[in-house]
Image (spheres, rainbow, N blue to C red):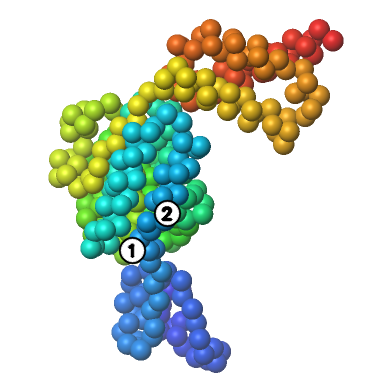
Amino acid sequence: MLENFDSLVRILEESQIEKVLINNPPLFLLNKIKLFSEKIPIEKHQYKKVTENKIKQINKHFDEKIIGQKKAKKIICRKLLAQLIRPSKKPLVLMFYGNPGIGKTETAKYISKMLYGNDNIVREQMTMVGGEASVKYYKATTHNEDSFSKKLLNRFSNVILLDEFALAPEFFHTTFFQMFDEGEYVDQNFNVDVSNSIIICTSNLLSIRDMESSINPALLSRFDGFIEFGDFTIEEKKIIANKVYLEITASKNMRKKYRDRIDRTKILADFSKEIHSFSNMRTIRRFIEDSISNHLLEDIIEK
């Protein structure tokens, strides 16, 4: 129906419909609308820049949500301020790098929550990129197919997360040149405004030199900052373990009859004995979950 624009207009006129709202029309339809009448109003939503107060709030509450990344916090706030004072609406493009499971994705969600009131970020797993399906997704062959551009159009936050960016095939990197440079993502169906956005790429590589061998140099030069996420210290691991324990055993998550059977001191003591074997949030959470389950299982079997 959209392709047959003249017929659509005729149907609307015959139905005596005076006003029609079209949300995110594909380019071919938008061009036809413009040819039909230059007086048709076009309204565009644009995310505003980060504010000084938002940056202060991100800094203030960062350590409550993200454990062990004080150095990264300072650099992130500095880069957000740089975006605030720059005269253009160019996206802020950052690379978060370091070992897996130490807070990179959680930090992206935290920034979104503080800036836009939700952590419903646009998130793409770049390790899945490759082949014909990915070409269609990022280039969009027809307007009714699922695509990256549609995901951007329907976003609830201006934080965009590209996970494991360095692992995407190099020929896909050119897809993001204009997006990183000018704040526009263009495929054959849509021209998406991503100005003032915060584009966060993540990598499990441990140095910028490693990334230089994996990412197109022309694209790498478009990043505004490379932020290293450090490994957890012993004390930080203990904080995480205690936090995970409290989360699992919270009254909203666990029945009282189970909570009463668990010995918190023993579980955390068992964790401390093996603390050097845990390198990230996932392994810590798995150990605490298994320990709680094991204590409950022994108690249930004995009874």
Which residue does the image show at 31% across and 61% down from the upper left? 195
Task: Give the number of callouts.
Answer: 2
Residue 269, percent from left and from top: 60, 11
Which residue does the image show at 54% across and 88% down from the upper left? 17
Nearest the eye: 34 or 196: 196
Toward the left, the furthest residue is 218
In the rendered view, does 221 fall on the left or right side of 156?
Answer: left
In which quarter of the view is residue 96 placed? top left
In which quarter of the view is residue 270 placed? top right
Quickly name the residue at label 2.
Answer: 54
In the rendered view, does 289 fall on the left or right side of 142?
Answer: right
| SS of the residue under disc 1 | strand
Which residue does the image show at 67% across and 17% down from the upper left? 264
Residue 70, percent from left and from top: 38, 33
The quarter of the picture where the C terminus appears is top right
Quickly name the residue at label 1.
Answer: 193
Q: Are marks 2 and 1 in contact (CB under 8 Å)?
A: no
Q: Amino acid at mark 1?
A: Asp
Q: Is residue 110 above or below residue 155?
A: above
**In front of the other: label 2 or label 1?**
2
Answer few, some or many: residues within 10 Å of disc 1's Cα (few below 14, many 20 plus, some between 14 and 19).
many
In the rendered view, does 59 fall on the left or right side of 228?
Answer: right
Toward the right, the furthest residue is 303
Residue 122 visible in rendering: no
Which residue does the image show at 72% across and 17% down from the upper left? 262
Answer few, some or many: residues within 10 Å of disc 2's Cα (few below 14, many 20 plus, some between 14 and 19).
some
